[in-house]
Image: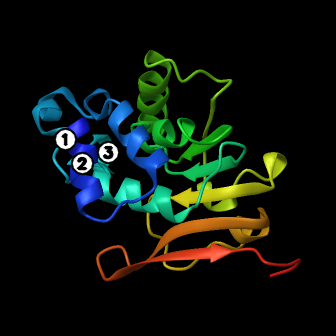
Amino acid sequence: RLALARHLERNGIRDRRVLAAMAKVPRHAFVPAAYAARAYEDGALPLAAGQTISQPFVVASMTELARLSSTDRCLEIGTGSGYQAAILAEICDSVFSIEYVPELCALGERNLRALGYGPDRVHLRCGDGTRGWPEEAPWDAILVTAAPPEVPIPLLEQLALGGRLVIPVGALEGPQQLEVWERVGEGL
């Protein structure tokens, strides 16, 4: 974990809290057993249902771009195995995470709870993340782990004033661009 954090720092990650979270959270606990030996390589690894656990540099970059504080309420779209939610829980006050694939909903919850990220720290929901979590909004930060073709309007609407949305946007098999949106006033 420490070697991974040093690698991320050498490659441009500067936020000390992000580096500390990356060094603390045991990525091997979030990958399938067959890939545990590769858990600290800087690459994506396969999960169930054709999904992947994101490359550590992508997790760190998105977290850093969100400019999080210890008082922030964060929404993650795409729980997957729970790794990004655990990283956020080390930095934010509270984390809410939504996963669309039922098998991954169960996997993410098992992993997070086994490592002590209880429902008081990480709130989980299985469902359509493009709708956000309106009854818990507004959000100081929203991180989306899968690329929609365009930014979902409900996520923009649920940002708090000064809130940040970090999201890859683009075609599923085509070019994607990581975008950062910040709410600077009322309305869209």
What coloring was used for the rendering? rainbow
Q: Earlier in the sequence, mark 3 or mark 1?
A: 1
Is residue 35 something that shows in the picture? Answer: yes
Question: Which amino acid, mark 1?
Answer: Ala
Q: Quadrant of the N terminus?
A: top left
Is residue 46 something that shows in the picture? Answer: no
Q: CA distance from mark 1 to mark 2?
A: 5 Å
Residue position for label 2? 6
Give the mark toward the camera: 3 or 1. Answer: 1
Which secondary structure, mark 3? helix
Residue 118: quadrant of the picture: top right
Asked whether the residues under the numbered discs 1 and 2 touch, taking CB atoms below 8 Å apart as contact, a structural biologist would say yes
Q: CA distance from mark 3 to mark 2?
A: 32 Å
User: Is 90 drawn above or below residue 41 in the view shown?
Assistant: above
Asked whether the residues under the numbered discs 3 and 1 touch, taking CB atoms below 8 Å apart as contact, a structural biologist would say no
Q: At which x and y percent is residue 16?
A: 44, 49
Residue position for label 3? 49
Residue position for label 1? 3
* Left or right of residue 9, residue 99 in this image: right
* Left or right of residue 38, residue 169 in this image: right
Q: Dot 2: within a 10 Å radius of its alpha carbon, few (fewer than 14), some, or many (20 or more) residues?
A: some
Give the mark toward the camera: 3 or 2. Answer: 2
Question: Which amino acid, mark 2?
Answer: Arg
Q: Nearer the viewer, residue 138 or 10?
A: 10
Q: Earlier in the sequence, mark 3 or mark 2?
A: 2
Residue 12: quadrant of the picture: bottom left
Q: Dot 1: within a 10 Å radius of its alpha carbon, few (fewer than 14), some, or many (20 or more) residues?
A: few
Q: Which residue is at a point 50% across and 40% down the rendered structure image?
A: 85
Q: At which x and y percent is residue 111?
A: 41, 25
Q: At which x and y percent is residue 43?
A: 19, 54
Q: At which x and y percent is residue 83?
A: 40, 39
Q: Which residue is at a point 68% across and 74% down the rendered structure image?
A: 182
